[in-house]
Image (tube, rainbow, N blue to C red):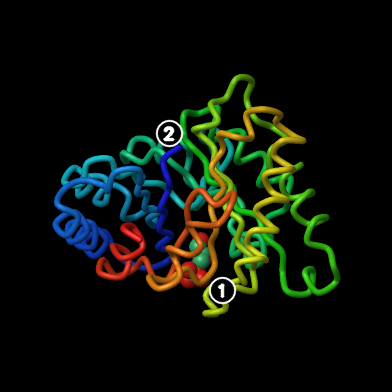
């Protein structure tokens, strides 16, 4: 299984700015992703096409959208379909990011609908899960992950390829705060996620990449990537500048 190093650029960068960052990444990496590593950038919708074009200079790199609406097309003002995303050259989409759950009010059930819809429409999905600080302190980590995964995975298409799905464990309290979870917390939560994937999906669980996200930085990435059941990282702030992101890509 290739290690997946994913960037989430959230609501940062115009198309030209995003393309310039990818061009700089491509130059510094000598035109190819390092052996054993997949590089993926979740760019804003308005930058998808520009990023996909710039990625022609970085062989093996992929681009994804940060959201989609689970319908073919229709009267859904402000929303974006799977077909529109694919037509921009993107092959992945994020579902269930905590900022969409907590700021935009997305439910577990809606996240599950989006995840299934995206997979049925030829996109690969990174499904994000993770607990708030209150939930952790109340001892609810396992319950929260169980419900987020049960509902998040409830609508998967028959015979989907495990390679088309990744799960990102992102503790909400570690996102954008500079507070990385302790190694033992990450290893524990990833063990729980792997176990739940086995419960829900059986033997396919082994081939689904489980990523860690939440204040991943150049100086902690190698240690996090070395933990059991960590198959990659999902990086926010530290992925915005090519110099920082490359240090994580090559960590
Ligand atoms: P930070 O790396 O900025 O904490 O963001 C993590 C994240 O939300 C990635 O999806």
Examine the image and state in which quarter residue 131 appears: bottom right
* Above or below 176: residue 72: above
* Above or below 65: residue 15: below
Around disc 1, counting alpha carbons within 10 Å, would you say few (fewer than 14), some (14 to 19), or many (20 or more)?
A: many
Label 2 or label 1, whichever lies nearer to me, is 1
Around disc 2, counting alpha carbons within 10 Å, would you say few (fewer than 14), some (14 to 19), or many (20 or more)?
A: some
- Please tell me which residue is depicted at 47% across the width and 52% down the height of the picture: 232
Relative image position of residue 194 (x, y in whole percent): 67, 44
Question: What is the CA distance from the residue labelled 2 to the residue labelled 1?
Answer: 36 Å
Secondary element under disc 1, as helix, strand or loop, is loop
Q: Nearer the viewer, residue 15 or 131?
A: 131
**Tag 2 near tag 1, CB within 8 Å:** no
Q: Nearer the viewer, residue 11 or 199?
A: 199
* Above or below 5: residue 180: below
Marked residue nearer the N-terminal end (2 or 1) = 2
Q: Which mark is residue 68?
A: none
Relative image position of residue 15 (x, y in whole percent): 26, 59
Q: Is mark 2 within 8 Å of ligand 1?
A: no
Secondary element under disc 2, as helix, strand or loop, is helix
Q: Residue furthest bottom?
A: 178
- Please tell me which residue is depicted at 44% across the width and 65% down the height of the picture: 221
Q: Which residue is mark 1?
A: 180
Q: Which mark is residue 83?
A: 2
Relative image position of residue 84 (x, y in whole percent): 40, 38
Relative image position of residue 212 (x, y in whole percent): 55, 58
- Please tell me which residue is depicted at 60% across the width and 67% down the height of the picture: 183
From the viewer's perspective, tell me whether residue 115 is left or right of residue 21. right
Can you say which quadrant of the picture contains the C terminus? bottom left
Q: Is mark 1 within 8 Å of ligand 1?
A: no
């Amino acid at each position: 299984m290739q290690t997946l190093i994913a960037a989430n650029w959230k609501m940062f960068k115009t198309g030209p700015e995003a393309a310039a960052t990818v061009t700089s990444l491509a130059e510094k990496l000598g035109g190819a992703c390092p052996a054993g590593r997949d590089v993926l950038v979740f760019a804003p919708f308005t930058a998808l096409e520009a990023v996909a074009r710039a990625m022609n200079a970085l062989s093996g790199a992929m681009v994804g959208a940060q959201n989609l609406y689970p319908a073919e097309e229709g009267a859904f003002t402000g929303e974006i379909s799977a077909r529109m995303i694919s037509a921009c050259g993107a092959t992945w989409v994020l579902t269930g990011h905590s900022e969409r759950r907590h700021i935009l009010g997305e439910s577990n059930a809606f996240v599950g609908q989006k995840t299934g819809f995206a997979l049925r429409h030829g996109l690969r999905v990174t499904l994000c899960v993770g607990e708030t600080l209150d939930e952790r302190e109340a001892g609810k980590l396992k319950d929260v992950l169980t419900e987020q995964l049960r509902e998040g995975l409830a609508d998967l298409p028959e015979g989907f390829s495990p390679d088309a799905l990744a799960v990102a464990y992102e503790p909400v309290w570690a996102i954008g705060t500079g507070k990385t979870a302790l190694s033992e917390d990450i290893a524990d939560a990833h063990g729980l996620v792997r176990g739940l994937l086995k419960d829900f999906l059986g033997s396919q669980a082994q081939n689904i990449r489980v990523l860690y996200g939440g204040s991943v930085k150049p100086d902690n990435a190698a240690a996090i990537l070395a933990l059991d059941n960590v198959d990659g990282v999902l990086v926010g702030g530290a992925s915005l500048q090519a110099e920082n992101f490359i240090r994580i890509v090559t960590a």
